[in-house]
């Protein structure tokens, strides 16, 4: 009788060693995968914490948002209501200029370097970045239309103050619905005093939008004068309305413009805040007599907010004053600038 043929249980010693090696390799790979999975889970949890913190800092109606200036931090903060009273919530994005409306915010950043770099960040309702646009110059003005659709910002190309005689600006407009970006609005066809106007020294700044997201107002300067212009996005045209108007800001009811007017010559503090009635084209000064170098923001149809140099070492404070020219200025927020009341 022949001996039985060896089966699987009677595998040779070399084969058995090979099998053990494969088992050890599989076990090691499983351990590595488990370690990677744990590490990824921890990393994901770490990344989720900032998102969770930001989600608690959303653009909510009835809140006042502003750029905190304590210790030069520049991070966006908010108060529980537009009166500026109540607890301050901090921890928003770091911005040089900030503005918000509806469910959109605009944050202008400037980062040190050689040369320094600047960006316009379009943020969603949770203040999360949706789009980043590289810019040239120093952030100066930022605005968002009431619907959140239209954005505009102004950068200083040279110099750092409108009070000086030599400066250059670059103003951009972004339609967030279509994504269309106008990098520099200086090429817009301009009608000045009823005639088509061309000049290499034209500068625009301080755009403010009407509720229809088509009509807008801005400042244009040329030949040593400043003008209020009314623009039309669909027609892509602008015309001057009057002189000596800077940094216009349209009221929520779209009937009035707040602006700064040059009332003192030969000084570094030449301006005073005024309000212009667009129906009658009559203007009146506001109770704030200090020089305000800012694009004032409407908290509501009756109140304007703006930033002024702070006291006791504070870089800036936010003040308010009645839009009808009566009453007196009031301190709204210490250590703050770029106020925006989200409605």
Image (spheres, rainbow, N blue to C red):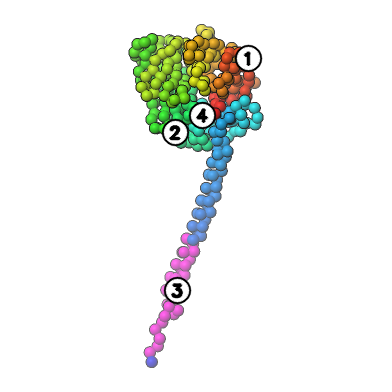
Give the CA separation, mark 2 to mark 1: 42 Å
Measuring 48% from the left and 23% from the top, which residue is drawn there?
141
83 lies left or right of 194: right
User: Viewer-nearest of labels 3 and 2?
Assistant: 2
Look at 34% across and 13% down and name the residue there: 196
Counting residues from the N terminus, which is met first, the one under dot 2 or under dot 1? 2
Asked if residue 110 can be seen in this view, the reply is no
Instruction: Give how far across and how far down residue 216 sits, in percent.
Output: 44, 21
Tell me the SS state at disc 4.
strand
**Image quadrant in which you'd find residue 236:** top left
Q: Is residue 8 magenta?
A: yes
* Quadrant assignment for the C terminus: top right
User: In the rendered structure, which segment of residues is drawn in magenta?
Assistant: 2-29
Q: Secondary structure at mark 2?
A: strand
Q: Which residue is mark 2?
A: 132
Read off the residue under disc 1: 327
Q: Are the residues at dot 3 and dot 2 in contact (C-beta closer than 8 Å)?
A: no
Mark before the other along the chain sequence, 2 or 4:
4
Task: Identify the element where label 1 is drawn.
Answer: loop
* SS at mark 3 in the image: helix
Label 3, residues with CA under 10 Å away: few <14, some 14-19, many ≥20: few
Where residue 53 appears, as percent x and y from the top left, is 57, 40
Q: Which mark is residue 16?
A: 3
């Amino acid at each position: 009788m022949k001996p039985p043929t060896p089966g699987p249980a009677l595998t040779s010693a070399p084969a058995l060693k090979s099998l053990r090696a494969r088992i050890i390799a599989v076990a090691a790979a499983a351990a590595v995968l488990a370690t990677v999975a744990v590490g990824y889970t921890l990393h994901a949890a770490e990344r989720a914490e900032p998102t969770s913190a930001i989600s608690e800092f959303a653009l909510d109606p009835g809140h006042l948002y502003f750029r905190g200036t304590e210790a030069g931090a520049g991070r966006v903060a908010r108060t529980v209501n537009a009166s500026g009273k109540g607890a301050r919530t901090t921890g928003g994005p770091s911005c040089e200029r900030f503005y918000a409306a509806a469910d959109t915010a605009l944050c202008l950043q400037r980062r040190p370097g050689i040369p320094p770099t600047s960006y316009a960040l379009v943020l969603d309702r949770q203040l999360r970045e949706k789009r980043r646009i590289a810019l040239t110059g120093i952030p100066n003005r930022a605005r968002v239309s009431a619907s959140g659709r239209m954005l505009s910002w102004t950068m200083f190309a040279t110099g750092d103050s409108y009070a000086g005689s030599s400066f250059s600006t670059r103003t951009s407009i972004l339609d967030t619905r279509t994504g269309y970006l106008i990098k520099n609005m200086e090429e817009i066809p301009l009608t000045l005093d009823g005639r088509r106007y061309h000049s290499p020294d034209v500068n625009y700044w301080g755009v403010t939008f009407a509720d229809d997201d088509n009509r807008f107002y801005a400042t244009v300067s040329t030949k040593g004068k400043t003008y209020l212009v009314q623009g039309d996005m669909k027609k892509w045209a602008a015309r001057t309305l009057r002189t000596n108007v800077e940094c216009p800001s349209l009221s929520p009811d779209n009937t009035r413009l707040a602006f700064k007017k040059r009332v003192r010559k030969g000084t570094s503090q030449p301006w005073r805040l005024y309000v212009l009635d667009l129906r009658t084209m009559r203007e009146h000064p506001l109770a704030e007599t200090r020089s305000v170098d800012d694009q004032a923001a409407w908290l509501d149809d009756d109140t304007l907010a703006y930033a002024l140099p702070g006291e006791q070492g504070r870089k800036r404070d936010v003040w308010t004053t009645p839009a009808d020219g009566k009453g007196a200025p009031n301190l709204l927020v210490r250590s703050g600038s770029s106020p925006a009341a989200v409605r």
